Amino acid sequence: MIRISTIFIAICMVLVAASLGFVLYSVAGISGSESAIVALTALTCLILYNAVSMRLRDRSDVGGQIADLSRGTADLARQVAEFGRRLAAVEGRVASANSTGADRMQGMAGEISELGGLVRQLAASVAHHEDLLAAAPAVQPVASPRDDVLQRVALAPTVVVAPPPPAPPPAILRSQTQLIGAIKQAIDENRLDIYLQPMVTLPQRKVRYYEAVTRLRDERDQVLAAEDFIEAAEAGGLIGRIDHMVMLRCVQVLRRLMIRSKDVGVFCNVSAATLSSPAHFTQCLDFLEANRALAPSFVLEFKQATFRNLGPTESENLAALAQRGYRFSIDHVSDLRLEPRELADRGVRFIKVPAALLLDAKQIATTDIHPSDLSDLLGRYGIDLIAERIEGERSVVDLLDYDVRFGQGFLFAPPRPLRPEGASATAEAPQTNPQDLNGASTSAPVSSPAAPPRATGSAALARRALGPN
Protein backbone atom coordinates (compact mmCIF):
# COMPACT_ATOMS: atom_id res chain seq x y z
CA MET A 1 0.00 0.00 0.00
CA ILE A 2 1.34 3.42 -0.98
CA ARG A 3 2.04 5.57 2.02
CA ILE A 4 0.33 8.97 2.46
CA SER A 5 3.71 10.71 2.62
CA THR A 6 4.61 9.36 -0.82
CA ILE A 7 1.33 10.59 -2.31
CA PHE A 8 1.86 13.98 -0.67
CA ILE A 9 5.39 14.25 -2.10
CA ALA A 10 4.14 13.33 -5.59
CA ILE A 11 1.41 16.00 -5.45
CA CYS A 12 3.93 18.59 -4.28
CA MET A 13 6.33 17.73 -7.14
CA VAL A 14 3.50 18.07 -9.70
CA LEU A 15 2.43 21.44 -8.22
CA VAL A 16 6.04 22.70 -8.25
CA ALA A 17 6.56 21.70 -11.88
CA ALA A 18 3.18 23.20 -12.94
CA SER A 19 3.92 26.45 -11.08
CA LEU A 20 7.30 26.70 -12.78
CA GLY A 21 5.71 26.27 -16.24
CA PHE A 22 2.97 28.79 -15.43
CA VAL A 23 5.48 31.38 -14.25
CA LEU A 24 7.55 30.96 -17.41
CA TYR A 25 4.47 31.28 -19.58
CA SER A 26 2.95 34.28 -17.88
CA VAL A 27 5.96 36.27 -16.74
CA ALA A 28 8.81 35.32 -19.08
CA GLY A 29 6.57 35.27 -22.15
CA ILE A 30 7.60 31.77 -23.24
CA SER A 31 5.20 29.87 -25.37
CA GLY A 32 2.89 27.28 -23.87
CA SER A 33 4.64 24.25 -25.41
CA GLU A 34 8.05 25.39 -24.19
CA SER A 35 6.66 26.13 -20.74
CA ALA A 36 5.14 22.61 -20.62
CA ILE A 37 8.45 21.04 -21.65
CA VAL A 38 10.31 22.95 -18.90
CA ALA A 39 7.67 21.96 -16.35
CA LEU A 40 7.89 18.29 -17.43
CA THR A 41 11.69 18.39 -17.20
CA ALA A 42 11.54 19.84 -13.70
CA LEU A 43 9.03 17.16 -12.69
CA THR A 44 11.36 14.44 -14.02
CA CYS A 45 14.32 15.82 -12.10
CA LEU A 46 12.30 15.94 -8.90
CA ILE A 47 11.18 12.36 -9.41
CA LEU A 48 14.75 11.15 -9.99
CA TYR A 49 16.04 12.99 -6.91
CA ASN A 50 13.33 11.51 -4.75
CA ALA A 51 14.00 7.98 -6.05
CA VAL A 52 17.76 8.23 -5.40
CA SER A 53 17.27 9.62 -1.89
CA MET A 54 14.79 6.88 -1.03
CA ARG A 55 17.19 4.20 -2.37
CA LEU A 56 20.04 5.51 -0.19
CA ARG A 57 17.81 5.59 2.89
CA ASP A 58 16.58 2.03 2.25
CA ARG A 59 20.17 0.82 1.83
CA SER A 60 21.19 2.17 5.23
CA ASP A 61 18.14 0.55 6.82
CA VAL A 62 18.93 -2.81 5.19
CA GLY A 63 22.56 -2.57 6.36
CA GLY A 64 21.43 -2.06 9.95
CA GLN A 65 19.06 -5.01 9.69
CA ILE A 66 21.82 -7.23 8.30
CA ALA A 67 24.15 -6.22 11.18
CA ASP A 68 21.44 -7.05 13.73
CA LEU A 69 20.90 -10.40 12.02
CA SER A 70 24.63 -11.17 12.15
CA ARG A 71 24.77 -10.39 15.87
CA GLY A 72 21.76 -12.60 16.49
CA THR A 73 23.34 -15.42 14.50
CA ALA A 74 26.58 -15.13 16.52
CA ASP A 75 24.64 -15.24 19.81
CA LEU A 76 22.73 -18.27 18.60
CA ALA A 77 25.99 -20.01 17.65
CA ARG A 78 27.46 -19.34 21.12
CA GLN A 79 24.35 -20.71 22.78
CA VAL A 80 24.46 -23.83 20.62
CA ALA A 81 28.14 -24.35 21.48
CA GLU A 82 27.39 -23.93 25.20
CA PHE A 83 24.54 -26.44 24.98
CA GLY A 84 26.85 -28.85 23.15
CA ARG A 85 29.51 -28.53 25.86
CA ARG A 86 26.98 -29.14 28.62
CA LEU A 87 25.57 -32.12 26.75
CA ALA A 88 29.07 -33.58 26.35
CA ALA A 89 29.73 -33.08 30.08
CA VAL A 90 26.46 -34.81 30.97
CA GLU A 91 27.27 -37.70 28.62
CA GLY A 92 30.73 -38.02 30.19
CA ARG A 93 29.27 -38.15 33.69
CA VAL A 94 26.71 -40.73 32.62
CA ALA A 95 29.42 -42.85 31.00
CA SER A 96 31.62 -42.55 34.11
CA ALA A 97 28.71 -43.52 36.34
CA ASN A 98 27.94 -46.52 34.15
CA SER A 99 31.60 -47.59 34.20
CA THR A 100 31.80 -47.22 37.98
CA GLY A 101 28.58 -49.18 38.39
CA ALA A 102 29.87 -51.94 36.15
CA ASP A 103 33.13 -52.13 38.10
CA ARG A 104 31.23 -52.32 41.38
CA MET A 105 28.94 -55.01 40.04
CA GLN A 106 31.94 -56.98 38.80
CA GLY A 107 33.65 -56.67 42.19
CA MET A 108 30.49 -57.73 44.00
CA ALA A 109 30.10 -60.68 41.67
CA GLY A 110 33.66 -61.78 42.42
CA GLU A 111 33.12 -61.46 46.17
CA ILE A 112 29.85 -63.39 45.96
CA SER A 113 31.58 -66.12 43.96
CA GLU A 114 34.41 -66.35 46.50
CA LEU A 115 31.92 -66.40 49.38
CA GLY A 116 30.04 -69.23 47.66
CA GLY A 117 33.25 -71.23 47.42
CA LEU A 118 33.93 -70.63 51.12
CA VAL A 119 30.43 -71.80 52.00
CA ARG A 120 30.93 -74.99 49.95
CA GLN A 121 34.24 -75.65 51.71
CA LEU A 122 32.59 -75.07 55.09
CA ALA A 123 29.78 -77.47 54.19
CA ALA A 124 32.29 -80.14 53.14
CA SER A 125 34.20 -79.69 56.40
CA VAL A 126 31.00 -80.02 58.45
CA ALA A 127 29.98 -83.15 56.50
CA HIS A 128 33.42 -84.66 57.13
CA HIS A 129 33.10 -83.99 60.87
CA GLU A 130 29.64 -85.58 60.88
CA ASP A 131 31.07 -88.68 59.20
CA LEU A 132 33.77 -88.89 61.87
CA LEU A 133 31.15 -88.61 64.62
CA ALA A 134 28.97 -91.27 62.98
CA ALA A 135 31.94 -93.64 62.69
CA ALA A 136 32.77 -93.30 66.41
CA PRO A 137 31.70 -96.17 68.84
CA ALA A 138 28.06 -95.99 69.94
CA VAL A 139 28.78 -96.75 73.66
CA GLN A 140 31.26 -94.45 75.36
CA PRO A 141 32.10 -94.05 79.02
CA VAL A 142 30.59 -91.18 80.90
CA ALA A 143 32.90 -88.27 80.53
CA SER A 144 33.44 -85.51 82.99
CA PRO A 145 32.76 -81.92 81.96
CA ARG A 146 36.49 -81.38 81.62
CA ASP A 147 36.81 -84.39 79.28
CA ASP A 148 33.85 -83.08 77.25
CA VAL A 149 35.55 -79.76 76.79
CA LEU A 150 38.80 -81.44 75.78
CA GLN A 151 36.92 -83.65 73.31
CA ARG A 152 35.23 -80.64 71.65
CA VAL A 153 38.56 -78.89 71.41
CA ALA A 154 40.10 -82.01 69.83
CA LEU A 155 37.29 -82.28 67.29
CA ALA A 156 37.40 -78.59 66.43
CA PRO A 157 39.54 -77.53 63.44
CA THR A 158 43.12 -76.85 64.28
CA VAL A 159 43.92 -73.17 64.54
CA VAL A 160 47.52 -72.14 64.42
CA VAL A 161 47.79 -68.95 66.42
CA ALA A 162 50.48 -66.61 65.23
CA PRO A 163 52.97 -65.69 67.92
CA PRO A 164 52.80 -62.07 68.96
CA PRO A 165 55.31 -59.86 67.20
CA PRO A 166 58.44 -59.16 69.17
CA ALA A 167 58.29 -56.03 71.21
CA PRO A 168 60.28 -53.18 69.74
CA PRO A 169 63.44 -52.27 71.59
CA PRO A 170 62.99 -49.54 74.15
CA ALA A 171 63.53 -46.07 72.78
CA ILE A 172 66.82 -44.52 73.70
CA LEU A 173 66.34 -41.15 75.32
CA ARG A 174 68.62 -38.60 73.74
CA SER A 175 69.12 -34.93 74.20
CA GLN A 176 68.77 -32.53 71.29
CA THR A 177 72.54 -32.37 70.83
CA GLN A 178 72.94 -36.16 70.91
CA LEU A 179 70.10 -36.62 68.41
CA ILE A 180 71.63 -34.09 66.02
CA GLY A 181 74.97 -35.89 66.28
CA ALA A 182 73.30 -39.24 65.59
CA ILE A 183 71.53 -37.79 62.56
CA LYS A 184 74.73 -36.32 61.16
CA GLN A 185 76.55 -39.62 61.65
CA ALA A 186 73.72 -41.53 59.95
CA ILE A 187 73.84 -39.15 56.97
CA ASP A 188 77.63 -39.49 56.68
CA GLU A 189 77.42 -43.29 56.85
CA ASN A 190 74.48 -43.45 54.39
CA ARG A 191 72.04 -44.95 56.88
CA LEU A 192 69.10 -43.09 55.41
CA ASP A 193 66.49 -45.58 54.15
CA ILE A 194 63.55 -45.08 51.79
CA TYR A 195 60.24 -46.85 52.34
CA LEU A 196 57.50 -46.85 49.69
CA GLN A 197 53.77 -46.80 50.41
CA PRO A 198 51.39 -47.16 47.45
CA MET A 199 48.47 -44.90 46.58
CA VAL A 200 45.67 -46.81 44.86
CA THR A 201 42.73 -45.83 42.72
CA LEU A 202 39.26 -46.23 44.17
CA PRO A 203 37.36 -48.47 43.85
CA GLN A 204 39.66 -50.52 41.56
CA ARG A 205 42.57 -50.41 44.07
CA LYS A 206 45.18 -50.27 41.34
CA VAL A 207 48.52 -48.79 42.32
CA ARG A 208 48.97 -45.39 40.66
CA TYR A 209 51.55 -43.55 42.80
CA TYR A 210 54.06 -44.26 45.57
CA GLU A 211 55.01 -42.03 48.48
CA ALA A 212 58.62 -42.11 49.60
CA VAL A 213 58.80 -42.29 53.41
CA THR A 214 62.13 -41.52 55.07
CA ARG A 215 63.55 -43.70 57.84
CA LEU A 216 66.86 -43.24 59.63
CA ARG A 217 68.94 -45.94 61.35
CA ASP A 218 71.13 -44.97 64.28
CA GLU A 219 74.38 -46.60 65.34
CA ARG A 220 72.43 -49.47 66.94
CA ASP A 221 70.33 -50.03 63.80
CA GLN A 222 67.27 -48.70 65.59
CA VAL A 223 64.86 -47.25 63.02
CA LEU A 224 63.70 -43.68 63.59
CA ALA A 225 60.58 -42.40 61.85
CA ALA A 226 60.55 -39.01 60.18
CA GLU A 227 58.55 -37.36 62.94
CA ASP A 228 61.24 -38.47 65.43
CA PHE A 229 64.17 -36.68 63.80
CA ILE A 230 62.84 -34.01 61.41
CA GLU A 231 62.64 -31.26 64.04
CA ALA A 232 66.13 -32.03 65.30
CA ALA A 233 67.46 -32.11 61.72
CA GLU A 234 65.91 -28.69 61.02
CA ALA A 235 67.37 -27.30 64.24
CA GLY A 236 70.81 -28.64 63.32
CA GLY A 237 70.69 -27.41 59.72
CA LEU A 238 70.81 -30.95 58.33
CA ILE A 239 67.40 -31.07 56.68
CA GLY A 240 68.78 -29.72 53.40
CA ARG A 241 71.22 -32.64 53.08
CA ILE A 242 68.44 -35.10 53.97
CA ASP A 243 66.08 -33.65 51.34
CA HIS A 244 68.80 -33.79 48.68
CA MET A 245 69.59 -37.44 49.49
CA VAL A 246 65.88 -38.33 49.49
CA MET A 247 65.40 -36.62 46.10
CA LEU A 248 68.33 -38.60 44.71
CA ARG A 249 66.89 -41.90 45.96
CA CYS A 250 63.38 -41.04 44.73
CA VAL A 251 64.61 -40.24 41.23
CA GLN A 252 66.51 -43.54 41.12
CA VAL A 253 63.40 -45.40 42.30
CA LEU A 254 61.24 -43.61 39.73
CA ARG A 255 63.60 -44.54 36.89
CA ARG A 256 63.41 -48.20 37.92
CA LEU A 257 59.63 -48.09 38.16
CA MET A 258 59.22 -46.45 34.76
CA ILE A 259 61.07 -49.32 33.12
CA ARG A 260 58.03 -51.49 33.93
CA SER A 261 55.28 -48.92 33.52
CA LYS A 262 55.15 -45.31 32.39
CA ASP A 263 51.87 -44.74 34.21
CA VAL A 264 53.41 -44.40 37.67
CA GLY A 265 54.61 -41.57 39.89
CA VAL A 266 56.54 -40.93 43.10
CA PHE A 267 55.76 -38.40 45.83
CA CYS A 268 58.81 -36.89 47.55
CA ASN A 269 58.49 -34.84 50.75
CA VAL A 270 60.33 -31.51 50.94
CA SER A 271 60.64 -29.45 54.11
CA ALA A 272 59.92 -25.75 54.47
CA ALA A 273 63.51 -25.16 55.66
CA THR A 274 64.89 -26.41 52.34
CA LEU A 275 62.46 -24.20 50.42
CA SER A 276 63.59 -21.10 52.32
CA SER A 277 67.34 -21.84 52.34
CA PRO A 278 69.06 -20.37 49.24
CA ALA A 279 72.06 -22.71 49.40
CA HIS A 280 70.13 -25.94 49.91
CA PHE A 281 67.38 -25.00 47.46
CA THR A 282 69.91 -24.11 44.76
CA GLN A 283 71.50 -27.54 45.13
CA CYS A 284 68.11 -29.28 44.90
CA LEU A 285 67.02 -27.07 41.99
CA ASP A 286 70.14 -27.95 40.00
CA PHE A 287 69.46 -31.64 40.57
CA LEU A 288 65.80 -31.31 39.56
CA GLU A 289 66.78 -29.29 36.49
CA ALA A 290 69.06 -32.15 35.41
CA ASN A 291 66.14 -34.59 35.79
CA ARG A 292 63.53 -32.34 34.22
CA ALA A 293 62.32 -35.14 31.94
CA LEU A 294 60.86 -36.91 35.00
CA ALA A 295 58.88 -33.86 36.14
CA PRO A 296 55.44 -35.17 35.05
CA SER A 297 55.88 -38.25 37.28
CA PHE A 298 57.83 -36.68 40.17
CA VAL A 299 55.61 -34.87 42.69
CA LEU A 300 57.07 -32.65 45.42
CA GLU A 301 55.06 -32.74 48.64
CA PHE A 302 54.82 -29.94 51.20
CA LYS A 303 52.87 -29.47 54.42
CA GLN A 304 49.73 -27.36 54.53
CA ALA A 305 51.41 -25.03 57.03
CA THR A 306 54.21 -24.41 54.52
CA PHE A 307 51.79 -23.12 51.87
CA ARG A 308 49.98 -20.96 54.41
CA ASN A 309 53.20 -19.27 55.56
CA LEU A 310 54.90 -18.66 52.22
CA GLY A 311 57.18 -15.67 52.10
CA PRO A 312 58.64 -13.90 49.05
CA THR A 313 61.62 -16.28 48.89
CA GLU A 314 59.50 -19.43 49.21
CA SER A 315 56.99 -18.19 46.61
CA GLU A 316 59.79 -17.42 44.15
CA ASN A 317 61.35 -20.85 44.68
CA LEU A 318 57.99 -22.58 44.17
CA ALA A 319 57.48 -20.63 40.97
CA ALA A 320 60.92 -21.75 39.75
CA LEU A 321 59.98 -25.40 40.33
CA ALA A 322 56.60 -24.94 38.62
CA GLN A 323 58.28 -23.35 35.59
CA ARG A 324 60.33 -26.52 35.20
CA GLY A 325 57.19 -28.64 35.04
CA TYR A 326 57.15 -30.05 38.58
CA ARG A 327 53.83 -30.55 40.33
CA PHE A 328 53.12 -30.17 44.03
CA SER A 329 51.13 -32.02 46.67
CA ILE A 330 49.89 -30.88 50.08
CA ASP A 331 49.79 -33.20 53.10
CA HIS A 332 49.40 -32.80 56.89
CA VAL A 333 46.04 -31.13 56.24
CA SER A 334 44.49 -30.05 59.54
CA ASP A 335 41.32 -28.38 58.21
CA LEU A 336 39.36 -28.07 54.97
CA ARG A 337 39.61 -24.31 54.56
CA LEU A 338 41.22 -24.47 51.13
CA GLU A 339 41.51 -22.02 48.23
CA PRO A 340 41.54 -24.26 45.11
CA ARG A 341 42.10 -21.44 42.61
CA GLU A 342 45.12 -20.05 44.47
CA LEU A 343 46.60 -23.50 45.02
CA ALA A 344 46.14 -24.44 41.36
CA ASP A 345 47.86 -21.22 40.27
CA ARG A 346 50.86 -22.16 42.42
CA GLY A 347 51.14 -25.59 40.78
CA VAL A 348 49.36 -27.80 43.33
CA ARG A 349 47.82 -30.87 41.67
CA PHE A 350 47.22 -33.16 44.70
CA ILE A 351 45.82 -32.64 48.19
CA LYS A 352 46.05 -35.46 50.75
CA VAL A 353 43.40 -35.31 53.47
CA PRO A 354 43.07 -37.86 56.30
CA ALA A 355 40.02 -40.06 55.87
CA ALA A 356 38.91 -39.33 59.43
CA LEU A 357 38.93 -35.60 58.66
CA LEU A 358 36.83 -36.05 55.51
CA LEU A 359 34.28 -38.21 57.32
CA ASP A 360 34.14 -36.00 60.42
CA ALA A 361 30.67 -34.46 60.77
CA LYS A 362 32.15 -31.48 62.65
CA GLN A 363 33.84 -30.27 59.46
CA ILE A 364 30.46 -29.34 57.95
CA ALA A 365 30.08 -26.47 60.42
CA THR A 366 33.67 -25.17 60.04
CA THR A 367 33.96 -25.13 56.24
CA ASP A 368 32.12 -23.36 53.45
CA ILE A 369 31.65 -26.57 51.47
CA HIS A 370 30.41 -30.01 52.41
CA PRO A 371 33.25 -32.58 52.47
CA SER A 372 31.31 -34.71 49.98
CA ASP A 373 31.59 -31.90 47.41
CA LEU A 374 35.30 -31.25 48.01
CA SER A 375 36.49 -33.71 45.36
CA ASP A 376 34.34 -32.11 42.64
CA LEU A 377 35.41 -28.59 43.68
CA LEU A 378 39.09 -29.47 43.52
CA GLY A 379 38.60 -31.33 40.24
CA ARG A 380 37.36 -28.15 38.56
CA TYR A 381 40.81 -26.66 39.10
CA GLY A 382 42.75 -29.80 38.11
CA ILE A 383 43.50 -30.95 41.67
CA ASP A 384 43.05 -34.60 42.72
CA LEU A 385 41.91 -35.44 46.24
CA ILE A 386 43.75 -38.30 47.98
CA ALA A 387 42.31 -39.80 51.16
CA GLU A 388 45.15 -40.99 53.40
CA ARG A 389 45.39 -43.00 56.64
CA ILE A 390 42.64 -45.40 55.56
CA GLU A 391 42.52 -48.34 57.95
CA GLY A 392 39.08 -49.93 57.47
CA GLU A 393 36.77 -51.11 54.71
CA ARG A 394 33.96 -49.01 56.16
CA SER A 395 35.95 -45.87 55.45
CA VAL A 396 36.44 -46.94 51.83
CA VAL A 397 32.68 -47.36 51.33
CA ASP A 398 31.99 -43.91 52.78
CA LEU A 399 34.77 -42.30 50.72
CA LEU A 400 33.33 -43.75 47.51
CA ASP A 401 30.14 -41.80 48.26
CA TYR A 402 32.36 -38.68 48.44
CA ASP A 403 33.72 -39.42 44.91
CA VAL A 404 37.32 -39.77 46.19
CA ARG A 405 39.49 -41.19 43.40
CA PHE A 406 42.69 -42.11 45.30
CA GLY A 407 43.36 -43.73 48.67
CA GLN A 408 46.39 -44.44 50.85
CA GLY A 409 46.73 -46.25 54.14
CA PHE A 410 47.60 -49.42 56.01
CA LEU A 411 44.43 -51.06 54.67
CA PHE A 412 46.05 -51.26 51.23
CA ALA A 413 49.71 -51.63 52.20
CA PRO A 414 52.08 -50.28 54.87
CA PRO A 415 55.34 -48.56 53.92
CA ARG A 416 57.76 -51.19 52.63
CA PRO A 417 61.56 -50.84 52.59
CA LEU A 418 63.60 -51.15 49.44
CA ARG A 419 66.01 -53.98 48.85
CA PRO A 420 68.96 -54.00 51.22
CA GLU A 421 71.45 -53.38 48.42
CA GLY A 422 70.10 -49.85 48.02
CA ALA A 423 68.14 -47.80 45.60
CA SER A 424 71.00 -47.14 43.21
CA ALA A 425 71.18 -50.61 41.76
CA THR A 426 68.00 -52.51 42.38
CA ALA A 427 65.53 -50.04 43.79
CA GLU A 428 62.14 -51.43 43.12
CA ALA A 429 58.80 -50.84 44.74
CA PRO A 430 56.15 -53.33 45.81
CA GLN A 431 53.59 -54.14 43.19
CA THR A 432 50.01 -54.65 44.19
CA ASN A 433 47.97 -57.26 42.42
CA PRO A 434 44.66 -55.83 41.16
CA GLN A 435 42.81 -58.84 42.55
CA ASP A 436 44.32 -58.38 46.01
CA LEU A 437 41.61 -56.63 47.97
CA ASN A 438 43.79 -55.30 50.75
CA GLY A 439 46.57 -54.10 48.41
CA ALA A 440 49.30 -56.08 50.17
CA SER A 441 52.57 -56.20 48.34
CA THR A 442 53.67 -59.53 46.95
CA SER A 443 56.64 -58.72 44.75
CA ALA A 444 60.14 -59.88 45.51
CA PRO A 445 61.96 -56.54 45.37
CA VAL A 446 60.74 -55.55 48.84
CA SER A 447 62.27 -57.07 51.94
CA SER A 448 59.42 -57.26 54.42
CA PRO A 449 59.25 -59.14 57.72
CA ALA A 450 58.21 -62.76 57.59
CA ALA A 451 54.46 -63.22 57.68
CA PRO A 452 52.98 -65.09 60.67
CA PRO A 453 51.56 -68.58 60.11
CA ARG A 454 48.14 -68.54 58.55
CA ALA A 455 45.15 -69.94 60.41
CA THR A 456 43.63 -73.10 59.07
CA GLY A 457 40.21 -74.70 59.28
CA SER A 458 37.07 -72.76 60.14
CA ALA A 459 39.03 -69.83 61.59
CA ALA A 460 40.70 -69.25 58.23
CA LEU A 461 37.37 -69.58 56.44
CA ALA A 462 35.78 -67.06 58.74
CA ARG A 463 38.68 -64.66 58.32
CA ARG A 464 38.54 -64.91 54.55
CA ALA A 465 34.77 -64.47 54.54
CA LEU A 466 34.90 -61.40 56.76
CA GLY A 467 37.61 -59.72 54.70
CA PRO A 468 40.73 -57.81 55.79
CA ASN A 469 39.06 -56.44 58.93
Image (spheres, rainbow, N blue to C red):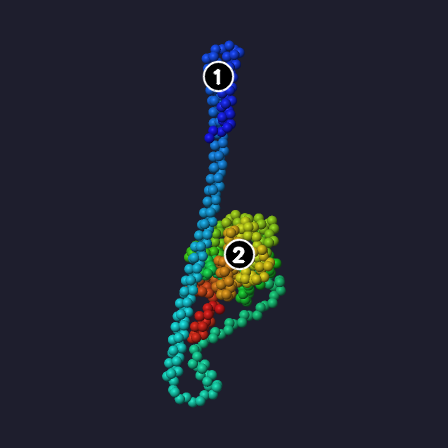
Q: Secondary structure at mark 1?
A: helix
Identify which residue is drawn at 47% across, 22% down.
48
Q: Secondary structure at mark 2?
A: helix
Toward the top, the furthest residue is 29
| Residue 226 x, y percent position in the rendering | 56, 61
Amino acid carrying mark 2 in the image: Asp
Residue highlighted by disc 1: 39
Identify which residue is drawn at 48% across, 34% down.
65
Residue highlighted by disc 2: 373
Q: Nearer the viewer, mark 1 or mark 2?
A: 1
Q: Quadrant of residue 181?
A: bottom right
Q: Quadrant of residue 264?
A: bottom left
| Residue 198 x, y percent position in the rendering | 48, 60
| Residue 438 x, y percent position in the rendering | 46, 65
| Residue 235 x, y percent position in the rendering | 61, 58
Whether residue 195 is visible: no
Q: Is residue 360 above or below residue 328?
A: below
Closest to the observer: 78 or 130? 78
